[in-house]
Amino acid sequence: YGTSRINERGHLEIGGCDVVELAEAYGTPLMIYDEVLIRRQCRAFVQAFQDKGMKAQVAYASKAFSSVAMCQLIEEEGLSLDVVSGGELYTALKAGFPPERIHFHGNNKSPEELNMALEAGIGCFVVDNFTELAMLHTLAEARKQQVKILLRITPGVEAHTHDYIATGQEDSKFGFDLNSGQALQALKQAVNQPYYHVLGLHAHIGSQIFDTKAFQLVIQRLAGFVQEAGNELGWPLSVLNLGGGFGIRYTREDTPLSPQEYVYALCDGVKQEWQAINQPLPEVWIEPGRSIVGEAGTTVYTIGAHKEVPGVRQYISVDGGMSDNLRVALYQAKYEACLANRMTAERSEVYTVAGKLCETGDILIWDLPLPPVKQGDLLAVFCTGAYGYSMANNYNRIPRPAVVMTRDSEAHLIIQRESYEDLLRLDVPLVSKVTQK
Ligand code: LLP
């Protein structure tokens, strides 16, 4: 992936930094981001729209990995930012991210979150349901503030990794349903509200998508809706946001397209469908998360205990697990890994890599071929950059790892390792009611 290579010492190197040295300097588990690769992905998405001559906005979905440094990098690359909570919004604002390039998502934004976003003057709200449609307008009216919105549509197309299903009505907690008439009703309501400026529509159909068929179908359905709504409301659509979900290569079995291939397909699809309905081309917005940071992240663990179940399998345990990577336990996600300190040794054994948490399901990788391991070896698990740290937790009171970014043989700490003191920061001691005799 990216700038990763094996150096002359037989160690894994990322961004010109020896991973063994990084582990010594920062401890393990350690998350390492390849800054060059993140920037390359950002630029590939932006460039692809330029190639096609399409007006566009690429918003990084910060739920995949959010931190102050990450928001600053995204700002430097000129992308927009998609946030889904007050916490992600707060992180972006503290990072100095320009509010007008922030889009706010979520199916249950609280009045406090909406007010915080109004106060900041963010660029766009993606309105998800009728409750929000009414509430946001009331809040905007109280502030005499115009707000730009997109309506989130549930298009009845659901993409799976290798497949998609198109249903008449999708049973989803997100968005206004297209087929039952909800979407049209929401649109009529929105365009009649004086403090709303309805920019257009949004649809996100899933994650880790490997082909473009499902996107084509969504574009078709939205074009049909625009035609129907346009005739009735005389409403010009200026933005079509097609969400994120572009796949990445966790293992050799995954066969994603490149950012360019995804974007070209979206642009061609929109051009074709919009020509068919004889409407002016909208701006196309996308919200990639995983495809920007996923492959750029590597987690390094120290190997500790070894256990053999005779005739069945060998377990090796690492100093992290489902506390820093919940995806295996939650989605049966698959990863590839290697020994960062002995990259060229022959992989003559097969191990199951377990985490250190008190949970039988805390397994990171089943049946991984590795050289014979010793206590203290370093295991590098690839492709952990998306939804790894962002879903990290303190189960078993395990502190969250440190995160570094590497580039040009330099490493920069971007999130400190959590300390035991950090874990107790919010704890309040018991006020005892037991009277002493
Ligand atoms: N836009 C919307 C409205 C979304 O719901 C999502 C992801 C994205 C964009 C970004 O999708 P991406 O490009 O990252 O696939 N925790 C799960 C993934 C949850 C995705 C939620 N929504 C995982 O670890 O696979």
Image (tube, rainbow, N blue to C red):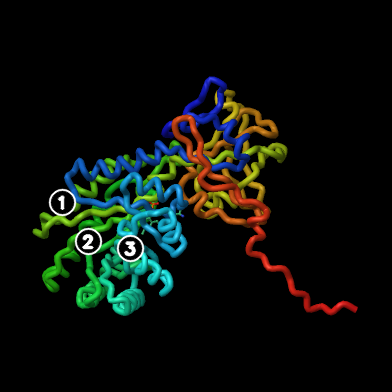
Residue 225 figure quarter: bottom left
**Residue 66: percent from the left, percent from the top?**
45, 52
Q: Secondary structure at mark 1?
A: helix
Query: Mark 2 or mark 1, which is nearer the start of the sequence?
Result: 2
- Relative depth, front residue between 373 and 136: 136
Q: Secondary structure at mark 3?
A: loop
Task: Give the quarter the ligand 1 occupies.
Answer: bottom left
Residue corresponding to mark 3: 122
Q: Locate the C terminus and report the quarter of the image it occupies.
A: bottom right
The label shown at residue 221 is 2
Three-letter code, disc 1: Lys
- Residue 363, x across and y down, in percent: 60, 47
Q: Please name which of the two marks, 1 or 2, marks the residue nearer to the observer.
A: 1
On the rendered structure, is 229 left or right of 288?
Answer: left
Looking at the rendered structure, the kind of residue marked 3 is Ile
Marks 3 and 1, Cα distance to the nearest angstrom? 29 Å
Residue 148, relative to residue 54: is it above or below?
Answer: below
The residue under the point 57% across, 45% down is 402
Whether label 2 lies within 8 Å of ligand 1 gets the answer: no
Crowd rating for badge 3 (residues with CA inside 10 Å; few <14, some 14–19, many 20+): many
Mark 1 near ligand 1 (CB under 8 Å)?
A: no
Give the Cα distance between marks 1 and 2: 14 Å
Q: Which residue is mark 1?
A: 271
Q: How many marks?
A: 3
Residue at 66% in and 39% down: 316
Q: In which quadrant of the rendered image does the N terminus lie?
A: top left
Q: Farthest residue toward the right?
A: 437
